[in-house]
Image: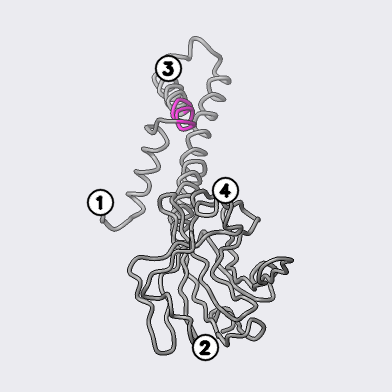
Amino acid sequence: MDTKEPTFERYAVTVLKRSIMHWGGSDTWFALASYFAIAILALAGIGVIESAISDAFQRVLSWIAIGWLLLLMVIITPFRMWAEGQEEVAKLKSRFDPVLRLTFDPKVTGCRVQTNLNQGPNAIYYRVRVEYLGTGTLSGCFGRLVDVTGDNTQGGFGNSLPLPFAASEDADATSKVLISGTPEFLDIGFITQGGAFHLKTVGGRIPNSISKLFSNPGSYRLRVQVASSVPNTPTETINLVLNYTKDWQTTEMTCPEENS
C-alpha cells in the first residue's frame, strides 16, 4: 500500500498518467483523443503537415489539440477521479449503514394484534416491525430470539431460537423476502385470554431450560435479532421488555430504546 505523503507533484503525475495511459471503458476514448492531439502537435512541430494543409488550418488544429489536453488534464480527469473517489466512499459507507430497521410500538398497526376467534381462545400477539431500508428486495431474512431473562432468572438456552414472520404458517415464514417500503412483522410471542404467555418460536419448540420461565408475573427482557442469508448484510438487534401480569389486557410489551 502506498503510504507516501500526497503532494501536488504526485497528483499531477497521476492526472497525466490517467489522461493518456488509462485504458478501459470510456477511458479508452479519452486516451485515444489524447494520442491524436499529441500526434497533431508533434507533426505540426516538425513541419510534416505544413505541406498538406494551410497554415491557418494548422494553427486551428494545434489550438484544438492544446485546448483538449488542457481541458482533459485540468477539468475532465480530476473531476472523474473525484467522482470515482466519492463512489468508493459511498460503497464503503453503505457497508456500515443499517440495512434493516426493527421497531416495536403497541400503537403501530401490526405490532400488537388481538385475535377474536369464534372457536378456541382469543389471544394478543406481539410482533416486531421489520423494514428493508435498501432498494429492491432483500432475500433470506430470518429472525431469532437470542436471549431472554426474568427478574430473578436467566433463560440460558444455548443456541438462539428461530422466530417466524407472520403469518407463521406461510411457507416463507422462516426465510422472508423483504421488499423496500413494505414492512413485515416478526412474531415474538402471545398471551391468551386466560393469561398464559407463550413465545412464538418456529414449530413451537421451547427448550426445557425456559419452558417454565413465564410461570410467574414479572418483568422479562428479550433480545431479538433479524438477519439475512445474503453475504455482508448487517444483523440488527432490538431489545424488548415484557411486563407480564398474567392478565391479557394489562400485560404490556415495550421497547425501551424507542421510549428513551
Relative vertical location of residue 96 with respect to residue 125 in this rendering, above or below: above
Q: For the residue labelled by badge 4, is the local secondary structure a helix, a strand or a loop? A: strand
Where is residue 128, by image quadrant?
A: bottom right
* x and y, in percent, of residue 87 in the image: 48, 49
Residue that carries the numbered disc 1 in the rendered image: 1
Amino acid identity at mark 3: Gly
Q: Quadrant of residue 245?
A: bottom right
Question: Decide: marks 4, 2 in contact (CB < 8 A)?
Answer: no
Amino acid type, residue under disc 1 in the picture: Met
Residue 150 position within the rendered picture, expressed as x and y whole percent measured from the top left: 44, 84
- Residue furthest front in the image: 119
Image depth: mark 2 or mark 1 in front = 2
Kindly identify the amino acid type of the residue bearing the numbered disc 2. Pro
Residue 42 among those drawn in magenta: no
| Disc nearest the viewer among 4 and 1 | 4
Mark 1 or mark 2, which is nearer the start of the sequence? 1
Up/down of 136 relative to 207, above or below: above
Above/below status of 13 relative to 164: above
Taken as a whole, is the magenta stretch helix, strand or loop? helix
Q: Secondary structure at mark 2?
A: loop
Secondary structure beneath disc 3?
loop
Residue drawn where x is 37% and y is 32% of the image: 21
Q: CA–CA distance between discs 4 and 2?
A: 41 Å
Q: Which mark is residue 137?
A: 4
Q: Which mark is residue 47?
A: 3
Position in image of residue 202 (x %, y %): 48, 60
- Numbered badge on residue 217: 2
